[in-house]
Amino acid sequence: AELPQRRLWLETFLGLVPGLVRVEAERAATWAPRALEAPFELPLAELRRWTDALAAATGEEPAPDLPDRGEPILLRGVVDRIDAHRETGELAVLDYKTGALPTGRAVERLDELQIILYAAAVECGAVAAVAGGPVATGAYYGVHADGQGPPPRPHLPADEAGRRLLARGGAELVRLALGAADPDGAFPLLPREWAGQGPAALPCATCDFRGVCRIEELVVPAATARKLDKLVNRKDPV
């Protein structure tokens, strides 16, 4: 029997079709789809080489050094969509989002790295579906009732600021990958807040493990402790 949730999702999606058709008709004048759901496998050493070259060209800081280790670190993923510019051949990476789009500020702060990782994978030649080449732009593509398509200003702009963002994001990806591969690495609950870089919201509202988590037992900075107190005692929404 057909699940009722599938019918609800189908009805919701069908309601988005007119808006998506308009977006794609306008986009087709400039961009042509080259690949959909394209997998990639990017060695961390290759990402670091690409990042360092880009950092040298843009004046940004290079990526951290890679330790000597027998097993290479591989970054794997799937790019939702890659388009090619009809005149220049430059590429654009798109990531579909059925929820709220990440803000441009979140991308600039490197809180959202998905688009940057996709662009790096393409430029490094790690996506078999395309031959590689420069990524001119990238964006999160809305697929929801509040809006369809990418925003007017792309999350990864096609200018010098976009290249600097790629260099900074590449270095951050290397740093995060090294941290994740370190068996003794630290994984603070709110890394930006822990580092004194400003307030952040708890992820508990969307965490699948909230029911079994002992989050209130953590030793955390005072600001985070106040958030946890509100959460545990239900004084305020997460």
Image (cartoon, helix red, strand yellow):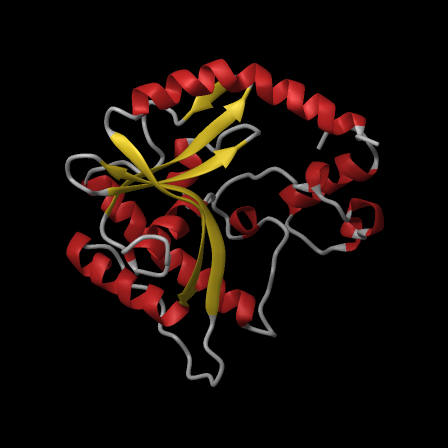
For the C terminus, give its image quadrant.
top right
Return the residue nearer the eye: 222 or 185.
Answer: 185
Q: Residue at x 77, y 37 (%)?
A: 231
Tell me if residue 42 comes above or below residue 227 in the rendering: below
Q: Position of residue 106 (x, y in %)?
A: 44, 37
Tell me if residue 28 comes above or below residue 158 in the rendering: above
Q: Quadrant of residue 120?
A: bottom left
Task: State whether residue 226 appears in this view.
Answer: no
Q: Is residue 184 left or right of residue 233?
A: left
Q: Position of residue 140 (x, y in %)?
A: 43, 34
Q: Residue at x 83, y 46 (%)?
A: 211
Q: Is residue 148 left or right of residue 35?
A: right
Return the residue nearer the eye: 76 or 58.
Answer: 76
Q: Residue at x 60, y 74 (%)?
A: 184
Task: State whether residue 150 appears in this view.
Answer: yes
Q: Residue at x 63, y 19 (%)?
A: 12
Tell me if residue 51 comes above or below residue 32 in the rendering: below
Mark count: 0
Q: Quadrant of residue 131?
A: bottom left
Q: Position of residue 215 (x, y in %)?
A: 76, 50
Return the residue nearer the eye: 21 or 150.
Answer: 21
For the N terminus, give its image quadrant.
top right
Q: Is residue 177 left or right of residue 189?
A: left
Q: Is residue 210 left or right of residue 80?
A: right
Q: Quadrant of residue 56?
A: bottom left
Return the residue nearer the eye: 198 or 76.
Answer: 76
Q: Position of residue 81 (x, y in %)?
A: 41, 41
